[in-house]
């Protein structure tokens, strides 16, 4: 009886141990799954922030108090003939002129001295710094820098944003504008040179039509026409009155002329013709 009871107790313990192991494995798998999901979310967040950094036109750099560069954004190609991999791990002081290095070191030390308790960040100086970057070929480029010193890590680091000076940016924009205008003029000249004769003739006709339409049109003149049946002189009395009004004496009638009904008649021996142009019966002189 005792042996059977002992074997039964041992079997129960093994059963319970197996159940516990299964539960532990299930919990472990759940923890791993949660951990993997958290890693994926963190990676997605880092990628999103990296894309944001890539889209920023300003140069972003991170360096410590010794000047060692820990991070350089991909926009460094807009400023210097370097890649981020070439600059990371090198000294930031090598990419600045002597006067700019002196200013940066003094500003960094002032930020460390002004640090207070429970302070995580401090501005690098009181405003924007104007510096000169040194390119690979030794040329100098004037830029402006704005930085913040972080104290959260083991060693303080300075995160800076660098951009071209406003005057330099305006010059670059003017150059781009002139270049675009020049290319547009060349394209228009090329199109006009390749124009067909028919298209050129149509263009000339259109221009002539526009000139003709733009000229004012003259209004037609109305002429007063005298009909044949109308007489300029209505009667003899009116013509005589007109001569008297002008101070001209009426000529005396000759050749046996006489007045009939107020009209001066002239006789030529056969017929009498009035000054109004009408013929009357023949009178004997």
Image: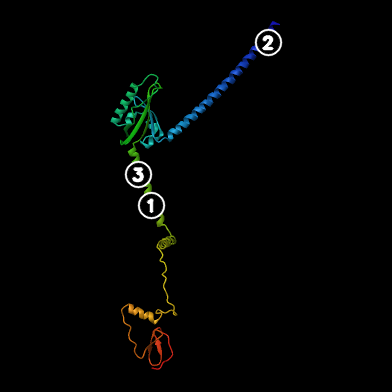
Residue 72 position (above or below residue 222): above
Residue 267: horizontal and vertical position, in percent?
Answer: 38, 90
State the colouring used for the structure image: rainbow
CB within 8 Å, label 3 to label 1: no
Residue at the farthest top position: 2
Q: Nearer the viewer, mark 2 or mark 3?
A: 3
| Residue at the far front in the pictured view | 261
Q: CA distance from mark 1 to mark 2?
A: 100 Å
Q: Quadrant of residue 164?
A: top left
Q: Position of residue 177 (x, y in %)?
A: 37, 45
Q: Earlier in the sequence, mark 2 or mark 3?
A: 2
Q: Is residue 254 above or below residue 212?
A: below
Residue at 37% in and 80% down: 239
Of marks 1 and 2, which one's residue comes earlier in the chain?
A: 2
Marks 2 and 3, how far apart in space? 94 Å
Q: Which residue is mark 1?
A: 186
Give the number of marks. Answer: 3
Residue 218 sits in quarter? bottom left
Q: Residue at x 33, y 34 (%)?
A: 143
In the image, what residue occupies the spot 58% across and 20% down?
A: 27
Locate residue 215: give its quadrant. Answer: bottom left
Quarter the N terminus occupies: top right
What residue is pinned by disc 3? 175
Choose between 193 and 274: the one closer to the eye. 274
Quarter holding the C terminus is bottom left
Is label 1 in a helix, a strand or a loop?
helix
What residue does disc 2 label? 8
As measured in the structure, the alpha-carbon distance from the residue carrying label 3 to the one carrying label 1 is 17 Å
Q: Circle 3 — which element? A: helix
How far from the left and from the top, in percent, is residue 132?
31, 33
């Amino acid at each position: 009886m005792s042996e059977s009871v002992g074997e039964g107790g041992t079997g129960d313990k093994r059963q319970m141990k197996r159940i516990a192991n299964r539960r532990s494995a299930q919990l472990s798998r759940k923890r791993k799954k949660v951990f993997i999901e958290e890693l994926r979310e963190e990676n997605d967040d880092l990628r999103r922030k990296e894309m944001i950094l890539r889209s920023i036109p300003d140069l972003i750099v991170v360096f410590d108090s010794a000047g060692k560069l820990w991070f350089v954004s991909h926009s460094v190609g807009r400023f210097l003939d370097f890649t981020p991999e070439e600059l990371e791990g090198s000294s930031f002081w090598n990419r600045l002129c002597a006067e700019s290095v002196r200013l940066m070191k003094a500003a960094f030390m002032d930020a460390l001295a002004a640090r207070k308790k429970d302070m995580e960040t401090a501005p690098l100086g009181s405003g924007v710094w104007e510096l000169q970057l040194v390119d690979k070929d030794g040329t100098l480029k004037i830029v402006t820098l704005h930085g913040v010193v972080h104290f959260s890590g083991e060693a303080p680091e300075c995160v800076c944003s660098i951009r071209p000076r406003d005057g330099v940016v305006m010059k670059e924009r003017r150059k781009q504008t002139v270049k675009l205008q020049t290319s547009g003029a060349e394209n228009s000249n090329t199109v006009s040179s390749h124009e067909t004769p028919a298209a050129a003739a149509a263009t000339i006709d259109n221009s002539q039509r526009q000139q003709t339409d733009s000229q004012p049109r003259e209004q037609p003149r109305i002429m007063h026409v005298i009909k044949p049946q109308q007489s300029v002189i209505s009667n003899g009395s009116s013509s005589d009155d007109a001569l008297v009004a002008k101070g001209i004496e009426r000529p005396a009638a000759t050749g046996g002329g006489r007045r009939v009904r107020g009209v001066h008649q002239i006789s030529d021996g056969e017929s009498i013709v009035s000054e109004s142009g009408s013929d009357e019966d023949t009178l004997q002189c």
